[in-house]
Image (cartoon, rainbow, N blue to C red):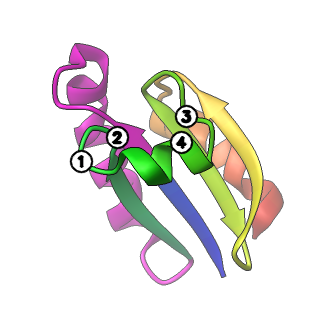
Amino acid sequence: MVDVVFAWAPWCPTCRAFLPIIDEYARDSKGKIRVGKLNVGENPSISSSYSILSVPQILVFDNGQLKETLPGAMHKDEIQSKMAAYR
């Protein structure tokens, strides 16, 4: 199973603007790709273990293994394009 984790912070305006895009992508991908959100401020140990130094950032896991890190905010079609390799 492929998982997408959106690393964000509430103090980050770009992150907050990107949240609806992530939510829409999650609805569209339901059953194919699991999508989650990681608040880096509330989860510093997880953020540290994946070397998340800036937000927003998308982490892509395939069968539990980190495969790719995508920095910055993207449009939904850009995310879909990147994730096409994992389907």
Return the residue at label 1.
42
Quarter of the figure with residue 16: top left
Could you give the CA–CA distance between mark 4 and mark 1, rounded to whole angstroms? 12 Å
Image coordinates for residue 58, horizontal then vertical, percent: 54, 41
Sort mark 3 into few (<14), some (14-19) or many (20+) by Cα contacts within 10 Å. Answer: some
Under circle 2, the secondary element is: loop
User: Which amino acid lies under the numbered mark 2 shown in the image of this protein?
Assistant: Val
Tags 1 and 3 touching, CB below 8 Å: no
Q: Earlier in the sequence, mark 4 or mark 2?
A: 2
Q: Earlier in the sequence, mark 4 or mark 1?
A: 1
Query: Is the N terminus in the top left, top right, bottom left or bottom right quadrant?
Result: bottom right
Amino acid at dot 4: Ser
**Residue receiving disc 2:** 40
- Residue 84 placed where, x, y %? 74, 56
- Using the rendered view, name the quadrant where residue 36 is placed: bottom left
The kind of secondary structure the magenta stretch mainly shows is: helix
Question: In what quadrant of the picture does the C terminus appear?
Answer: bottom right
User: From which residue to which does the magenta span run?
Assistant: 6-32
- Identity of the amino acid at label 3? Ile
Q: Looking at the image, do the residues carrying marks 1 and 2 touch, with CB atoms under 8 Å apart?
A: yes
Q: Which residue is mark 4?
A: 48
Residue at 36% x, 51% y: name it. Answer: 38
Which residue is the site of mark 3?
A: 52
Under mark 1, the amino acid is Glu
